[in-house]
Image: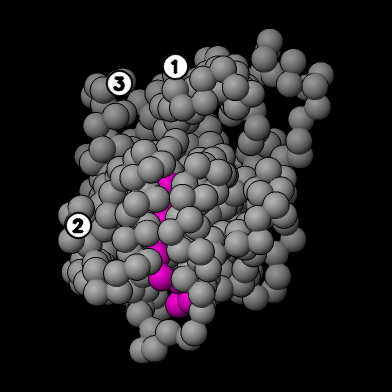
């Protein structure tokens, strides 16, 4: 097959969070198929980052991210934008033009949009005539904005989510209905979409982890008791999770384990996160790192205190594969066939999250047992090869219908 990926954020080998699944899909599909990619690049990539993906692609094209929209532009978007205001955050004529040039220069069997935000470039796009269109939904924005509103109420974030709901439901689900196939990362994600719009053609293609790269250390270096969280923090569910844990959970953990530190790893920490670290030296914020694996190796517990959003948290898979015991909210562990108390500890209330985190920090035997069981789950069910084989089968089925 000839496959064209349309991607929200450049998925190079060093990226963390959601885009790593896209990097690995391209990497493994390229072994048997011709793959190209067009993606937004949030900043000027290094030669190493470009090479890490370019070697798997027939063509790799990077498009500058749309700049921030001023107050007048946002008002115009609200009144008469070509798409709902939330989708205007990523609206780019350059992306449309680049995608059209690629479609005219080579015959692709199928285009895959990774993230709903770039599914708009597949929707009703005449440049893609004759090409099957697959929309990979890491997170449904309509449902995610509703969750933000439910959690944040009428705070600044909640009011913003309310405004972003304008026109979102109809536009987003009309996009999905127009696709030849919709992909979700979890059965729960599929069921949420079908509850809103029955009849969508949806397949579940799970996340994965590189079990050879992310693996337990033969010995861990000496370090203070360490709790880790990982994320791309411009993505608000990650920012909210970090701030929620730091403000409402971490003080209780520190009362029980006085020398513990909270290690927050990932790109784009926000001002409120940095202010928390300034006030509390036990909170360590790294910013963007070239490789997350060393941070797993110096951590005792990984937390995923996510309260908003949807999809699958690849960060949890990486922690489990690395031999780090995980404490998560139930939403953070969505889609993961893990068993509470066996290979993960689940909690939602701040006091319960603190209790479970402290249990693992204090009980090495419990911590090691949960980590070993989680690693076994990763090896058996979540290798990248397994997920890409499922995706390959779905794409072949979609493309085959073209000839009917």
Q: Is residue 163 above or below residue 326?
A: above
Determine whether 362 is above or below 201 in the image: below
Q: Residue at x 37, y 33 (%)?
A: 179
Q: Are marks 2 and 1 in contact (CB under 8 Å)?
A: no
Q: Earlier in the sequence, mark 2 or mark 3?
A: 3
Instruction: Provide residue 358's location: percent of width, then percent of height.
Output: 37, 59
Instruction: Pick the residue in front: 1 or 241.
Output: 241
Q: Quadrant of residue 364?
A: bottom left
Relative to residue 20, is residue 183 depicted above or below? above
Marks 3 and 1, the one that precedes in the sequence: 1
Q: Is residue 97 visible in this depiction of the protein? A: no
Residue that mark 2 sits on: 341
Residue at disc 2, secondary structure: loop
Which one is in front, 309 or 207?
A: 309
Q: From this viewpoint, is residue 366 visible?
A: yes
Q: Which residue is mark 1?
A: 170
Bounds of the magenta segment? 297-305
Going 80% across and 22% down the picture, which residue do you hit?
A: 71
Q: Is residue 156 left or right of residue 374?
A: right
Residue 197 - label: 3
CA gap between label 2 and label 3 equals: 36 Å
* Closer to viewer: mark 2 or mark 1: 2
Residue farthest to the top? Answer: 79
Q: Position of residue 183 (x, y in %)?
A: 33, 42
Camera-side residue of 124 and 198:
198
Location of residue 126 with respect to 213 vertically, above or below: above
């Amino acid at each position: 097959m000839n496959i064209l990926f349309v991607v929200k954020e450049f998925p190079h080998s060093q990226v963390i969070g959601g885009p790593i699944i896209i990097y690995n899909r391209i990497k493994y599909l390229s072994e048997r198929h011709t793959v190209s990619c067009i993606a937004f690049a949030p900043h000027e990539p290094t030669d190493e980052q470009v090479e890490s993906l370019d070697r798997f692609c027939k063509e790799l094209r990077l498009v500058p991210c749309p700049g921030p929209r001023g107050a007048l532009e946002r008002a115009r978007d609200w009144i008469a934008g070509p798409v709902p205001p939330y989708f205007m955050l990523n609206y780019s004529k350059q992306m449309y033009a680049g995608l059209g040039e690629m479609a005219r220069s080579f015959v692709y069997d199928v285009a895959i949009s990774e993230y709903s935000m770039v599914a708009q470039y597949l929707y009703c796009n005449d440049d893609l005539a004759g090409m099957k269109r697959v929309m990979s939904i890491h997170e449904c924005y309509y449902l995610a904005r509703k969750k933000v509103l439910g959690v944040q109420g009428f705070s600044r974030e909640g009011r913003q989510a309310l405004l972003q709901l304008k026109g979102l439901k109809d536009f987003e689900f009309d996009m999905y209905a127009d696709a030849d196939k919709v992909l979700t990362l979890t059965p729960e994600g599929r069921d949420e979409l079908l509850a809103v719009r029955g009849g969508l053609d949806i397949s579940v293609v799970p996340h994965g982890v590189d079990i050879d790269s992310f693996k337990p250390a033969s010995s861990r270096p000496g370090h203070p008791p360490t709790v880790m969280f990982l994320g791309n923090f411009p993505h608000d569910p990650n920012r909210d999770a970090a701030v929620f844990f730091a403000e409402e959970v971490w003080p209780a953990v520190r009362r029980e384990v006085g020398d513990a530190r909270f290690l927050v790893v990932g790109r784009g920490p926000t001002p409120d996160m940095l202010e928390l670290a300034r006030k509390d030296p036990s909170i360590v914020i790294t910013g963007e790192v070239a490789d997350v694996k060393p941070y797993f190796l110096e951590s005792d517990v990984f937390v995923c205190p996510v309260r908003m959003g949807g999809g699958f948290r690849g960060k949890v898979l990486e922690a489990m594969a690395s031999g780090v015991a995980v404490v998560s909210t139930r939403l953070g562990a969505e889609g993961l066939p893990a068993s509470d108390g066996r290979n993960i500890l689940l909690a939602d209330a701040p006091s319960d999250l603190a209790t479970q985190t402290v249990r693992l920090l204090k009980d090495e035997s419990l911590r090691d047992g949960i980590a070993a069981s989680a690693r076994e789950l990763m090896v058996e069910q979540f290798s990248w090869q397994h997920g890409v084989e499922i995706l390959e089968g779905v794409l072949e089925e979609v493309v085959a219908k073209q000839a009917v």
